[in-house]
Amino acid sequence: MAVIITDLCINCEACIDECPATAIVGVDFSPNGEYTYVKPEKCIECVDCSVPKCFDACPTEGAIAWDLAYTLENEPHFLAGNDTGRYKIREHKVKGLMLPSVKEQPFRESIAKDLRKSNQPLEF
Ligand code: SF4
Ligand code: SF4
């Protein structure tokens, strides 16, 4: 990942069309079934922008939080989350689950790992 949407989300869907990576889906496609979801295998953390677009569009404080970077080192986290239904990693017909070992994603190196581990809300 990435960023993750928390249960503070009010499902306004303002973030969905702003995402340059088409990584965000509404509640109907969300594995949690309750609020909007970011696909970690697609999120690029808007590394080329000053502020992540989803955060910029979101009216709800605390609805968007940091998650671990979508890198090989963190593959066990995403695999375990996929098993518990926290994530729903895309399954490619040929490549299988699109885990970091298949494709890593860019991430903001300036964000400390402990902020990511504890899912701290984004602040800019
Ligand atoms: S950080 Fe950027 S790429 Fe990731 S979900 Fe938000 S808008 Fe999309
Ligand atoms: S903009 Fe914020 S509150 Fe609205 S759907 Fe996205 S994360 Fe949820």
Image: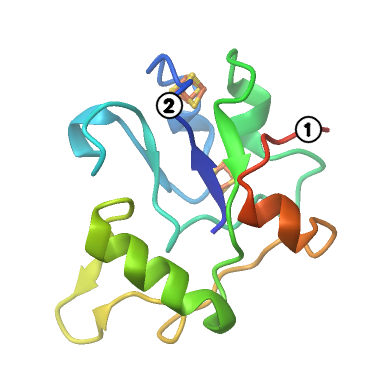
- Confirm or reject: label 2 Cβ below 8 Å from ligand 2: no
Q: Up-down: is 58 above or below 48?
A: above
**Residue 85 image position (x, y, % from top left):** 24, 53
**Residue 13 image position (x, y, % from top left):** 41, 21
Residue topped by disc 2: 7
Q: Residues within 10 Å of mark 1 (few under 14, many from 20)?
A: few
**Residue 47 image position (x, y, % from top left):** 72, 55
Q: Residues within 10 Å of mark 2 (few under 14, many from 20)?
A: some
The image quarter containing residue 123 is: top right
Q: Amino acid at mark 1?
A: Glu
Q: Secondary structure at mark 1?
A: loop
Residue at image position (42%, 26%) is: 7
**Residue 29 image position (x, y, % from top left):** 21, 38
Can you tell which mark lies on residue 30? none
Q: Secondary structure at mark 2?
A: loop
Q: Up-down: is 26 above or below 112?
A: above
Residue topped by disc 1: 123
